[in-house]
Image (cartoon, grey):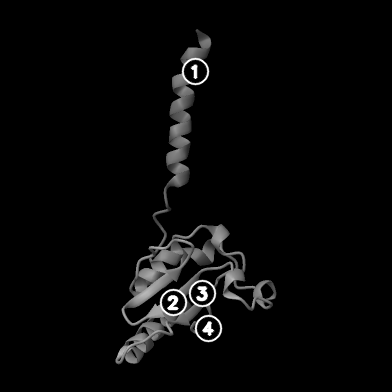
Amino acid sequence: MRYMARSPLAAFLCAAIALVSCSQPTSMQSVADGASPLKNRIPPADANKYRSVRDARDWQNPCLMVQANGIRPISGAKDTPTLSPADAVAYLEKLPSMAWPYGLVVVVAENGIRVSGDDARINRNREELVRLLEKAGIKVEFWPSA
C-alpha cells in the first residue's frame, strides 16, 4: 500500500521536472535580435577539427546550398525544404549540439545548376545568408558548387 501512495507523487514530480527541463528560458532572444542561443551552447569553430576534410561526404557539421529560390539544408533527408536566409539560420538554431562537432561553422555552397537570371538571385541569397550567419556567430566555409 505504501508503494502505491508514492507512485502518483513520483509521477507528478517526474512530469514537473521534465516540463521545466524541456522549456526554453524566457530570456532567450531570437536571431533577429542579434543574440544566438547557439553561441551559448556550441563552442567556436575549431579549424583543427575540420582542416583536413576535403570531401563533402566527410563534412560533419551543417551544410547549406544557396539556390535562386532560397537556401536548402543538405542532409540525409531527401525532402529538405527550401528556406529563406532567415529561416535557414532559425533551422540551424534548432539543431542539437551533436550536429556541431567542429564548433560553430557551416559549409555554404552555391547551386551549380543554373538557368538564365539565377546568378543575381543566388548572389542576393548568399549575401543575406552570410550576413545573418555572421550575426549569429557562425563561421562560414565556402565550398565550390557541385
In depth, the one of 24 and 61 nearer the eye is: 61
Q: Is 65 located above or below residue 93 in the figure?
A: below
Q: Label 4, on which residue?
A: 142
Left or right: residue 3 compared with residue 80: right
Dot placed on the residue nearer the N-terminal end, 1 or 4: 1
| Amino acid type at mark 3 | Ile
Q: Residues within 10 Å of mark 2 (few under 14, many from 20)?
A: many
Q: Nearer the viewer, residue 117 or 128?
A: 117
Mark 3 closeness class: few <14, some 14–19, many ≥20 residues within 10 Å? many
Residue in the picture at 53% in, 63% down: 40
Q: Are marks 2 and 4 in contact (CB under 8 Å)?
A: no
Where residue 97 sits in the image (x, y, percent)?
Answer: 55, 59
Q: Earlier in the sequence, mark 2 or mark 3?
A: 2
Q: Does residue 112 show up?
A: yes
Element under disc 3 = loop
Residue pictured at 33% horizontal, 74% vertical: 84
